[in-house]
Structure formats: C-alpha cells, structure tokens
C-alpha cells in the first residue's frame, strides 16, 4: 500500500476545541480504517505544523476522500504528501 505523510494545522475552530483532541484523533483513526488504511504513526508537532500522521492508504482516491472527510469537520487543514521508502526510491534513481 502507498505511504503518505499528512501534515495538519489546527484551524481556529480546532484551537477552540483543543481539549477534544483525543476524541478527534479517535475519529481520524475511524476515518482511516473506513478508507482501508493503516496508521503507522501520529505526532503533535512544534513549528509550522501542529500534527503529523504517517499512514498507508490503498489509493490516492482513498487518500483524497480521507483528507476531505477530515477537513470538512472544520478543525484541521490537511496537507498530504506521497512518501517513498528509501529502498524503493534508490531503485527509481539507479542509473541516473
């Protein structure tokens, strides 16, 4: 399954509801499972983003659905990036 890095920022609404971060995270995991995905790791961050999640999702279409379901709640803005394992990347660039 493809791996993705999700970087998220809390919206003003998300900051007002910061004490509800645990139920929101549980909902995220349910949405991920609904997408056929798997959580590899999740983190709260210092710096330009508030949260990060490393996930596996069966397809880009499912990733889009997941990101939209999370985003429409209004508490987080999601930025998604495809992540390639280094051994896979090394094969792609071999011979360049």
Image: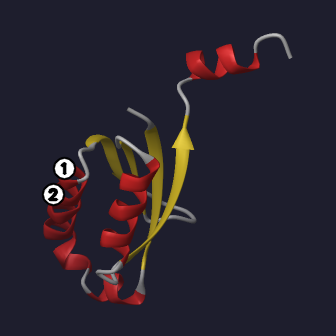
SS for dot 2 = helix
In the rendered view, tell whether residue 36 sits above or below residue 74.
above
Q: Position of residue 20 (x, y in %)?
A: 17, 76
**Residue drawn at (40%, 89%), measured in percent from left and top?**
12
Position of residue 52 in the picture relative to residue 20 (left or right): right
Q: Secondary structure under badge 1? A: helix
Q: Which residue is mark 2?
A: 30
Can residue 47 be seen in this snapshot?
Answer: yes
> Is residue 52 in sight in this rendering?
no
Looking at the rendering, which quadrant does residue 64 occupy? Answer: bottom left
- The structure residue drawn at horizontal position 13% and vertical position 68%, both measured from the top left corner, is 23
Residue 33 is labelled as 1
Q: Position of residue 70 (x, y in %)?
A: 32, 70
Q: Residues within 10 Å of mark 1 (few under 14, many from 20)?
A: some
Question: What colouring method underlies this structural image?
Answer: secondary structure
Q: Quadrant of the C terminus?
A: top right
């Amino acid at each position: 399954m493809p791996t993705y890095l999700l970087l998220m920022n809390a919206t003003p609404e998300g900051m007002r509801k910061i004490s509800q971060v645990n139920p929101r995270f549980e909902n995220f995991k349910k949405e991920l499972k609904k997408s056929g995905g798997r959580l590899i790791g999740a983190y709260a961050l210092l710096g330009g983003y508030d949260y990060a999640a490393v996930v596996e999702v069966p397809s880009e279409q499912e990733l889009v659905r997941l990101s939209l379901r999370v985003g429409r709640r209004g508490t987080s803005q999601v930025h998604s990036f495809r992540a390639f394992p280094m051994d896979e990347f090394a094969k792609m660039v071999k011979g360049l």
